Amino acid sequence: MKKLNYLLIFLVSFNTIAQEIENVAISTKFYGAGKIKKGPKKIYINSFNINYEIYKEAVDFKAGGNGGRIGGNTSSAKATAAVGLGGIDANKMQAKVNALFISYKNRLKKEGYTIIAPEAAGKTEAYSNWVKATGPYIAENYTGIITTAPKDYTFYYRGTKKNGKLKTSVFGDGLVKQKLSKELNDAVIADVNLYVMFSENGTDMFKGRAAKVKIKTNLRLSKDYAISIPKKLKKKKSTVGKLFGSVQIQGATDVYPASSNVTFSNKSGGSFLGNLKNDAEINGILKKQKIVAYQKQGSFVPTSFSSYTNYLDAKADRFSSKTKWIEVDGEKYAEGFYNVCNTFLEKQLDAFFKKIK
C-alpha cells in the first residue's frame, strides 16, 4: 500500500509540472570546448540574474495636423494601456531564486569544479572600479521588471547613473570577462540571465486615423524579447524650451533587449552560449487575454454648415487609457517560475558538461 501511495504522489507531482510548463527546447553554441576541457576546473559565477515581469505599460500617439480643404484638420490622439499582476509574493519568489542558485552550484561542484570566491574576483584589475553587492538582491532596473539575485551571492557591477539605473557598456562585457578569466588563471566565467515575462506587444497594421495599443498576456520563459518602456516627457526649463514644449516626442519608447541565456567562457578561447529554441510557456496560472486602448482622432473639414465651435471640438486632443490588474495565485506562480527556470538550467548544464567530458 505504501509503494502504491508513493507512486501516486510521484504521478501527481509529475502531472503538475507537466501541466505548468511547455517543452523547454534549448539551443546551444559551443566554440573551443577542448580549451575549456583542458583548462583548470575552476569556475567563477559572474552573474546570476533572474528577472520576472509584474507590470507592463504601452503607449501610441497619433499627431494631428492640417490637411487643407480636402483632408481637413485633425486632432492628436493618444492611447495608453497598462496591465499588472497582483498576488505575487516577493518572499516566495526570493526563496525560489535561492533554490535555483543552490541547485546550480551543487551541479557545478558535482562535476568536479571549484567555485572561486567573489573576494578573489574583487581583487582583480578587471573589477577594480566596480561596485560590490550581496544578495538577497531585488531591484526594478526596468519599469515593471524585477531583477533578483540569490541570498549569500556576491557580485560586481559598474555602478548606477543619476536616475538610479545600472551603468552599462556600449561594447558589452566580453572583454571584461576575458580579462577576468586571465587574472583568475584561465578560470571559466559563468553567467546566468533569465527572463520570465507575462506580456507581449500586439500589433495592428490597419488602425487608420487613430492611436491604438494592444498588450497580450502570455506567461513564459522568454527566448528573446524587446522590453519597451514609454518615455516620460520632461518639460524644458528655459523660456525658449517652454515655447516649443517637451524634450521628447509624444509616444516615444525606450527599448531594451532581453534574452534568457547561460554562458561559459575562458581566456583560452572556449565559449558556450545556451539559449531557448522557442519561448517556454507556463500554463495554468495566467489566462491569455488582450488589453486594448483605442482613440480615434478628431477631424474638421470646413463646410458651409460648420462653425468655430465644431472646429475647436474637433481639434481638441483626444486621450484613451485602459488599465487592468490580474490576480494570480502566488504559490502557483512561484512554482511555475521555478520549474521552467530550473528545467532550462539543468538542460543547459547537461549540454555543457557533455561536451567537455
Image (cartoon, rainbow, N blue to C red):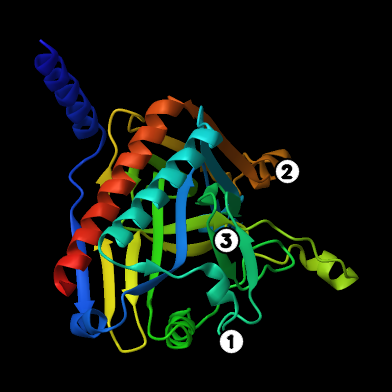
17 and 241: which is toward the camera:
17
Q: Is residue 258 left or right of residue 139?
A: left
Dot 2: element: helix
Q: Which amino acid does the dot numbered 2 rest on?
A: Tyr
Residue at 52% from the left image edge and 31% from the top image edge:
89
Residue at 53% from the left image edge and 68% from the top image edge:
118
- Location of mark 1 (residue): 125
- Residue 334, percent across and down? 41, 34
- Residue 305, percent across and down? 62, 39
Per the model, the C-alpha gap separating discs 1 and 2 is 71 Å
Residue at 48% from the left image edge and 39% from the top image edge:
95
Of labels 1 and 3, earlier in sequence is 1
Q: Which amino acid does the dot numbered 3 rest on?
A: Ala
User: Label 2: how many residues lie within 10 Å, few (<14), some (14-19) or many (20+)?
Assistant: few
Q: Which amino acid does the dot numbered 1 rest on?
A: Glu
121 and 210: which is toward the camera:
121
Q: Is residue 106 visible?
A: yes
Of labels 3 and 2, earlier in sequence is 3
- Location of mark 3 (residue): 252
- Location of mark 2 (residue): 308
